[in-house]
Image (spheres, rainbow, N blue to C red):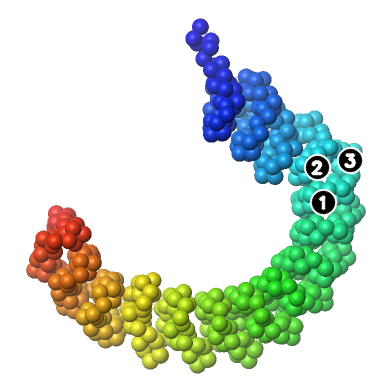
Amino acid sequence: MAMVDEPLYPIAVLIDELKNDDIQLRLNSIRRLSTIARALGEERTRKELIPFLSENNDDDDEVLLAMAEELGVFIPYVGGVEHAHVLLPPLETLCTVEETCVRDKAVESLCRIGSQMRESDLVDWFIPLVKRLAAGEWFTARVSSCGLFHIAYPSAPDTLKAELRSIYSQLCQDDMPMVRRAAATNLGKFAATVEAAHLKTDIMSMFEDLTQDDQDSVRLLAVESCASLGKLLEPQDCIAHVLPVIVNFSQDKSWRVRYMVANQLYELCEAVGPEPTKTDLVPAYVRLLRDNEAEVRIAAAGKVTKFCHILNPELAVQHILPCVKDLSSDSSQHVRSALASVIMGMAPVLGKDATIEQLLPIFLSLLKDEFPDVRLNIISKLDQVNQVIGIDLLSQSLLPAIVELAEDRHWRVRLAIIEYIPLLASQLGVGFFDDKLGSLCMQWLQDKVYSIRDAAANNLKRLAEEFGPDWAMQHIIPQVLEMFNNPHYLYRMTILRATSLLAPVMGAEITCSKLLPPVVNAAKDRVPNIKFNVAKVLQSLIPIVDQSVVEKSIRPALVELSEDPDVDVRFFANEALHAIDNAMVSG
């Protein structure tokens, strides 16, 4: 008897848990659906579990969302694709609920199931479902239906195809803006499945309806369709139908629509080809760069380099550069920041002469901008300009500004400069670097902000790697050793960190003769934080120096530290002593 009852047990538990007041229990139960389905077997899952889920009228969105997600991967548990249609009813119900994320997940799951269903099943089950949703009384069903047409359409016979196109056209003119928005969002996907003959007629008339919608939220979604439709149409059709729409949208009364055009314009240029880009889209882009809404200018400024890549240099200099000059002194710091993040990429497009003549003054004005993000965005892309104009000019024009930024009051700007120094060093060469930037690198080791000091220590290591140990021995090590006696313990900590980073680059000989003695001396420091950091540094030096040096200098210092009154100092000293013992065993 027990054997007979056992398969009933999971479904009984599920039903109990799904009706439980505790939402967590209901959620857990839904998330275990696949386990329950396996226990029930394919037939009972189809006949009992799925109908039960269809009737389940849980009112909690989290539970419904989990159910919509689970059902999307449920085909194997109901007996494969030939039975996939049994999963449609519960998902159809979920497509009509109030909560958007539940509906979206249900549509996603239906698309996943529909894309695996057999053609005959799609015609028998899936297409009727789409039609029911599209004719739904409540707008939520009609919204959901828009996302399913691209799955339903390819398998439909011709008469049904005509009906589906007609239904979609009605959805594009629905009374509810939310439905028209969904139709606009999904138009590109649907259009991709429609035959070329109907693309020009039916789809373009739907597109035109949406582009003339009185709601800006619908029109801005139609902008997104422009690029996808442009790629589907022949170039001449694209110029005839899509291009005028884009040009109109770039002058739309709603700034949100213009913002979308600014974001999408680069893709649209690719769709229409070079000639219309020059004649129609360049003026549209210039208008957007000069838009009276800062958000639109930000979106347009962020695409300035991409746009210049499509144009030839003369056109870029003639049309785009004057706008870029204006944007570099824009009243909105966010516009200037967006421009600064991409303007360096214009240098390779414009070439050396135009960069020197036109772009360099703009770089300089942005480097001196009062807003730190603008300065940061310029600093981080300097290498792109260096490739075009060469290091001599770069150093003459931009280096004074960089030196100024190295002492900027915003620590993030100083940090960006430090991180850029090794790259700058490799580009400037050792002679120039010593002249202009060497002293700065030492100065940063005594910055008030920890992140700067830490980055400065890393910076010394990277410079030593770049210019070699001999250079470091001459220019870095003496100054580092001098700082071991700094009266402020935080700066002494930074020097210990710098020492541990430099030792592997400098090699055993210099480490033993120059770096190890001051570290061992620092073990007698009166500050416990210094002492336990000494223990850590000594541990890091063990693999670098000879065993004899470890025994003669490092071990005695660590033994002394292991008897320190401070618990942390003792802990790290003992850790380091263990490391010595392990090294000896493995050696």
Q: Is residue 50 above or below residue 489?
A: above
Instruction: Give how far apart the Cα atoms at labels 3 and 2 are.
Output: 20 Å
* Camera-side mark, 3 or 2: 2
Quarter holding the C terminus is bottom left
Q: Secondary structure at mark 2?
A: helix
**Amino acid identity at mark 2:** Phe
| Label 2 sits on residue | 139
Say if residue 108 shows up in the picture. no
In percent of width and height, residue 419 lies at: 43, 75
Q: Which residue occupies 88% across, 56% down?
A: 209
Which comes before the other along the chain, label 3 or label 1?
Answer: 3
**Amino acid identity at mark 1:** Pro
Q: Secondary structure at mark 3?
A: helix
522 left or right of 447 in image: left
**Amino acid identity at mark 3:** Glu
Q: Quadrant of residue 406?
A: bottom left
Q: Quadrant of residue 484?
A: bottom left
Which comes before the other along the chain, label 3 or label 2?
Answer: 2
Mark 2 packing: few (<14 Cα in 10 Å), some, or many (20+)? Answer: many
143 left or right of 298 in image: right
| Label 3 sits on residue | 163
| Label 1 sits on residue | 177
How many marks the image carries: the answer is 3
In percent of width and height, residue 576 lies at: 18, 60
Instruction: Give how far apart the Cα atoms at labels 1 and 2 are.
Output: 10 Å
Q: Which residue occupies 56% across, 16% down?
A: 8
In percent of width and height, residue 317 lies at: 71, 85
Which comes before the other along the chain, label 1 or label 2?
Answer: 2
Q: Is residue 4 above or below residue 43?
A: above
Q: Which residue occupies 47% across, 87% down?
A: 404
